[in-house]
Amino acid sequence: MTTTQTHTLAIPGVDLVYDVRGPLPPSDGRPALLMIGQPMTAEGFNALAPHFTDRTVVTYDPRGLGRSVRKDGRTDHTPQQQAADLHLLVEALGAGPVEVLGSSGGAVTGLELVATHPGDVVTLVAHEPPINAVLPDASAAERARADFYEAYQAKGTGAGMAAFIAMTSWQGEFTDAYFGQPVPDPATFGLSTEDDGTRDDPLLSDLSWAISDYRPDASRLTAAPTRIVIAVGEESAGTYTARTALGLAALLGQEAVVFPSHHGGFMGGEFGYAGKPEEFAARLREVLDAG
């Protein structure tokens, strides 16, 4: 069993907490493998990381989430700041360049890291990055995002999450049929209707809108020495994040690589997602080895 060592990197504005499974530098000569998410913390990879006992795996809590306590007085989450943090983390590991699996908003952070520090990353696997700009119905996607934000502001977490689930499970473009639906009932999804009064959830508030508002620079990404692989879940077909993955792949002149399961396909039940972590790990290994 691989021992996990937890470290804290003090950088401007935050004490960044990260976990290392395996030796640094890696004993087999392969790059360290970073697994990053947003707004997910390191624990979201607890089911996936154990399938890579032959690799040095690094996970972390992004700035302002989980154990990484902010000291800069800000509450927003931007891919630019998170990529800058990751650059400092890669330097601190002393084992770069690295390989990166970026999930959801973590995939957006990975893209920004490649764009700004291309020498940090050998291969980036960007799994279903939620980027509105690559969609033909980008303005409608922004409207759908505003709907779950408004539901959250009006009635709290349960209402906001119900509207979020409705958005992310919708098939195809956000048409009048989508916006003409009844307001989703939290109880339908087994969610509480109680309102605890908080409005700072990084997923449901507007604190992370900079992630879905991100505009990838195709020229910088394609010019980088990094191998970029856009990944999409086989069970995600037609949904918002599958469409953003396909749109980004087209922007970069490639085809998305299909992975098992769905948006949380690497999870073992965390955060309400029950994926196929073993199958996901096997596919990830194939993709990384192909590089």
Image (spheres, rainbow, N blue to C red):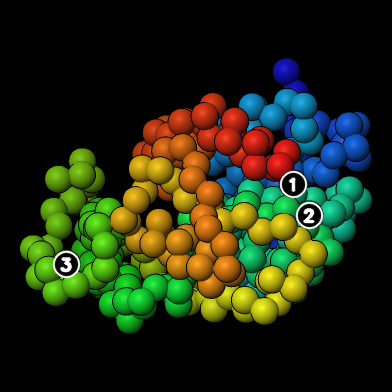
| Residue positioned 40% across, 56% down in the render | 242
Q: Does residue 179 appear left or right of residue 147 in this picture?
A: left
Q: Where is residue 67 in the image (x, y as percent from the top left)?
A: 63, 49
Residue located beneath label 2 in the image: 122
Q: Distance between the residues labelled 1 and 2?
A: 9 Å
Which residue type does callout 3 highlight? Tyr
Q: Distance between the residues labelled 3 and 1?
A: 40 Å
Q: Can residue 209 be seen in this view?
A: no
Q: Is mark 1 on a helix, strand or loop?
A: loop
Q: Which quarter of the figure has residue 74?
A: bottom right
Mark identifier at residue 178: 3
Q: How far apart are marks 2 and 3 (CA)?
A: 40 Å
| Residue positioned 24% across, 70% down in the render | 174
| Residue positioned 16% across, 67% down in the render | 178
Which residue type does callout 2 highlight? Val
Q: Is mark 3 on a helix, strand or loop?
A: helix
Q: Where is residue 27 in the image (x, y as percent from the top left)?
A: 90, 31
**Hey, which residue is sitting farthest top in the picture?**
1
